[in-house]
Image (cartoon, rainbow, N blue to C red):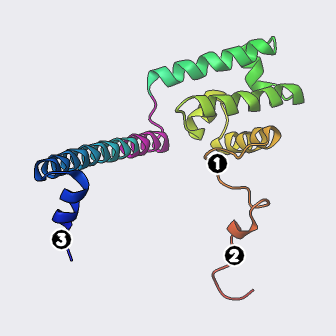
């Protein structure tokens, strides 16, 4: 039985060519390892960015740019209804409240503002914003991005009593 080296020489030609192939294979493997290391570094950087973004959102820390964009979007929504912002925020008409919910949904989706920040912008509680997000997402046939699941749609998340039997 012949050794692997002898079989390689018989397949490739000479010892020198076998050595060259081994060097090329080593360089190729090193390049693959370097690319994998780079990909892992990028993946870790992405995880860190996502963590930072979620932390900023959780603690209601937003940059001025996010607030400026949200303010502009609010003014555009009011202008679309041919109303000033104050009237847009206070109106109880169904058509206006639907437009206001749509504006909350857009601002939440397109900026880094939390539901608390969006609520403050509209003079509403964050639970009103969560309701608007669920409602608009439902109308659009989407999952409510980042919202607490609706217990009616997900009965497994309902609260069950943990105390004595009732």
The label shown at residue 3 is 3
State the residue in front, 71 or 90. 71
The kind of secondary structure element at disc 1 is loop
Tell me what residue is drawn at x 82 percent, y 39 percent: 139
Is residue 83 placed above or below 142 in the rendered structure? above
Q: Position of residue 111 (x, y in %)?
A: 56, 29
In the figure, is residue 36 to the left or right of 148? left
Tell me what residue is drawn at x 77 percent, y 38 percent: 136
Q: Quadrant of residue 86?
A: top right
* In this view, the mark in front (2 or 3): 3
Q: Is residue 83 magenta?
A: no
The kind of secondary structure element at disc 2 is loop
| Marks 1 & 3, CB-CB < 8 Å contact | no
The CA distance from mark 1 to mark 3 is 64 Å
The kind of secondary structure element at disc 3 is loop
The label shown at residue 147 is 1
Q: Magenta segment range?
A: 47-62
State the residue in front, 31 or 122. 31
Residue furthest to the bottom: 165
In the figure, is residue 95 to the left or right of 1? right
Q: Which quadrant of the figure contains the C terminus? A: bottom right
* In this view, the mark in front (1 or 2): 1
């Amino acid at each position: 039985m012949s050794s692997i080296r002898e079989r390689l020489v018989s397949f490739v030609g000479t010892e020198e060519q076998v050595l060259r192939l081994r060097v090329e294979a080593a360089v190729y493997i090193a390049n693959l390892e370097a690319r994998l290391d780079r990909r892992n570094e990028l993946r870790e950087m992405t995880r860190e960015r996502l963590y930072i973004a979620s932390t900023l959102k959780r603690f209601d820390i937003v940059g001025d740019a996010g607030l400026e964009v949200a303010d502009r979007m609010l003014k555009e929504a009011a202008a679309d209804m041919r109303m000033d912002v104050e009237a847009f925020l206070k109106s109880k008409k169904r058509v206006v409240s639907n437009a206001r919910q749509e504006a909350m949904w857009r601002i939440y989706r397109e900026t880094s503002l939390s539901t608390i920040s969006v609520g403050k912008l509209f003079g509403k509680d964050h639970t009103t914003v969560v309701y608007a997000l669920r409602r608009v997402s439902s109308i659009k046939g989407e999952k409510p991005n980042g919202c607490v699941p609706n217990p009616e749609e997900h009965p497994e998340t309902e609260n069950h009593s943990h105390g004595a039997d009732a």
